[in-house]
Amino acid sequence: MLCDNCGEREAQIHLTQIVDNTVTTMHLCEQCAAEKGVETGASVAKFPLGDFLASLGKGSGAETTAAGGEVACPACGGTLQDFRQTGRLGCAQCYTTFEPHLRDLLRRLHGSSQHAGERYAAPAATAAAGAGTGAGADAGPGRGVAAGPAAEIGELRARLQRAIQAEDFELAAELRDRLKVLE
């Protein structure tokens, strides 16, 4: 397909614009795309994650040791600079070697370096843990569920009713689907 702009070179960039529900598609060669200000493959970063990580670490100077040399992993030889360029660590030992830097990065990205989400619980552990929590535990899936499928169905139905009364329809849909699977 030839370039829509010059009609001479092969189109390598396909630009689709939607303005007021009107779709406009342009097929451009790299030169015409550059003239129109469209970023081409040559101008787009090779490792966007690496560039993002590098921008977070700019000005910190934390990646150097007291002697002024850069910290390197003793197992693979990877450096913090390598991680910032590629967004990948070299080996499992890198996590230990760069732990202070990774914690700082996680704190800046997520606001914390500790996981605060839900944790997987094996079915046997769920039944044992749920037996003493009672019916008021609405903390999430797999929590507060009594042993046995009939009791679990009863608990899910009760939680479904509470979700409907509270107009929490997303939770209600999730609970309905879980009930269908169990029944």
Image (cartoon, rainbow, N blue to C red):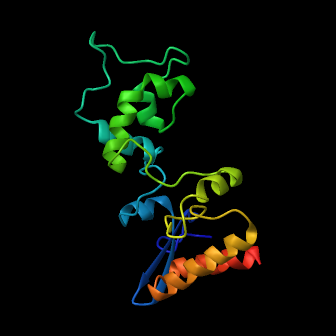
| Quadrant including the C terminus | bottom right
In the rendered view of the protein, which quadrant contains the N terminus?
A: bottom right
Q: Nearer the viewer, residue 10 or 20?
A: 20
- State the residue at coordinates (49%, 64%): 139
Please provide percent x and percent y for residue 54. 35, 38
Q: Position of residue 163 (x, y in %)?
A: 50, 81
Q: Residue furthest left?
A: 59
Residue nearer the viewer, 93 or 146:
146
Q: How many marks?
A: 0
Give above or below for 59 relative to 174.
Answer: above
- The answer to which quarter of the image holds residue 182 is bottom right
Q: Is residue 3 left or right of residue 106?
A: right
Residue 14 on image: x %, y %: 53, 69
The answer to whether 157 is drawn above or below residue 96 in the figure is below
Instruction: Report the residue at 74% width, 69% height from top.
Output: 149
Q: Is residue 9 above or below residue 120?
A: below
